[in-house]
Amino acid sequence: MKILVIGELKDNLLSSDSLELISKSVEMSEEVYLCTIGDVENPHAKIDNLICKYIRTNDNKLSTHATANLLSDLINKESIEVIFLSSSYLCRDLAAFLSVDFNSAAVTNVIDIELQNTFNAITAINGGKDLYSTEIDSDKKIVVIRPKSFEVKDLTITEVDQSDFLKLENLPIDTAINEVTIEPKSGPQLEDSSIVVSAGRGLGEAENLSLVNDLANKLNAAVGATRAIVDAGWVPYSQQVGQTGKTVKPDIYIACGISGATQHQVGMKDSKYIIAINKDEDAPIFQISDLGIVGDVHSVLPKLLELI
Ligand code: FAD
């Protein structure tokens, strides 16, 4: 079975989502293709035993259509059966193009693949409480995977040979983007940090977030949030953890004043070690916690800050 992984770069390295897809693919098949998309000249995206290609996008990243055409050509030429994409904005756009090109539905939000006599994509539904299995029997299986679904293997990564660059044609641009604003990022990032400290409505008001930020600073952790406080405007959406936010899988997840609704749990329940602080001993978050502190965040957090 030939698998194509669509890779993406972050700071000239393969993104953690791409590494997950590659790790899963090499487990499933000996014929894995990796086509990385990025805007740097010398991408570190070549992996031993994989056939590695690279598409250098225009600096303004308006080349989705042309990129999809190149991918379709590659898929046809190499008779690729399975296409794995991450859930990034670019990959979801590309999945739509490929879906039309190959007249195959793209299955999205997938957390696992089951291979027996059939090819089945597993999706979590009902806020992550139930699993749903979709048999994909089309010639081309287009699968969009949710982040943190697979473990990353140790991979040796080197620079892609110039001869493996695929050249973009200059297609007319049918969508005009006048301005791209990239949100400035500093400190540990939610997706990659080994510790995440998250805040919920139990903090009471936005000013009290300083307690969570101070704890995160001391632990060199990223700060996450529930949808309740994102909707209340306390923090930006980029910090939301959960079904409609980010999926995280840190070594330690500290939930402060979070009830643990299933939609929040689906984004963090696979963290290695979960610590929860909540004044309600029946809060659902305690059902998935390794350490539960029943108490008021306004007294527990200052004490923790004193001790660390
Ligand atoms: P609450 O549920 O109000 O919980 C606050 C908790 O704080 C309570 O358990 C309370 O006991 C505790 N508390 C109060 N005061 C204190 C104190 N002083 N000290 C300690 N504890 C205290 N939610 C997400 O988080 N992420 C998502 O991606 C997401 N997607 C959703 C998608 C859909 C389609 C829907 C319908 C909902 C989604 N939600 C999501 C919302 C989710 O259902 C919950 O409403 C939300 O997670 C609740 O956030 P919370 O825990 O901060 O608030």
Image (cartoon, helix red, strand yellow):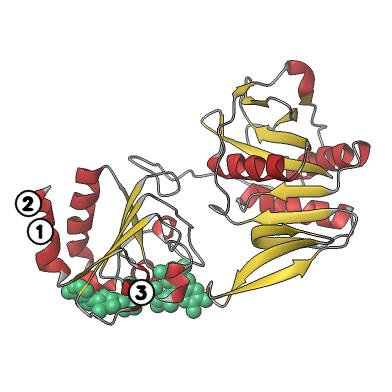
Q: Position of residue 65 (x, y in %)?
A: 78, 45
Residue identified by numbered label 3: 287
Label 1 near ligand 1 (CB < 8 Å): no
Identified at 81% across, 33% down, the residue is 170
Ligand 1 sits in which quadrant? bottom left
Q: Amino acid at mark 1?
A: Pro
Quarter residue 265 falls in: bottom left
Give residue 306's mark.
2
* Element carrying mark 1: helix
Q: Within 10 Å of the Cα at label 1, are there few (<14), some (14-19), or many (20+) other Cα atoms?
A: some
* 64 sits to left or right of 298: right
For the residue marked with disc 2, what is the amino acid?
Glu
Residue at image coords 90%, 36%: 78
- Disc on res. 302: 1
Compared to residue 18, the image places residue 261 above or below, namely: below
Q: Residues within 10 Å of mark 3 (few under 14, many from 20)?
A: few
Crowding at dot 2, Cα within 10 Å, few <14 / some 14-19 / many 20+, comes out as: few
Q: Is residue 31 above or below residue 175?
A: above
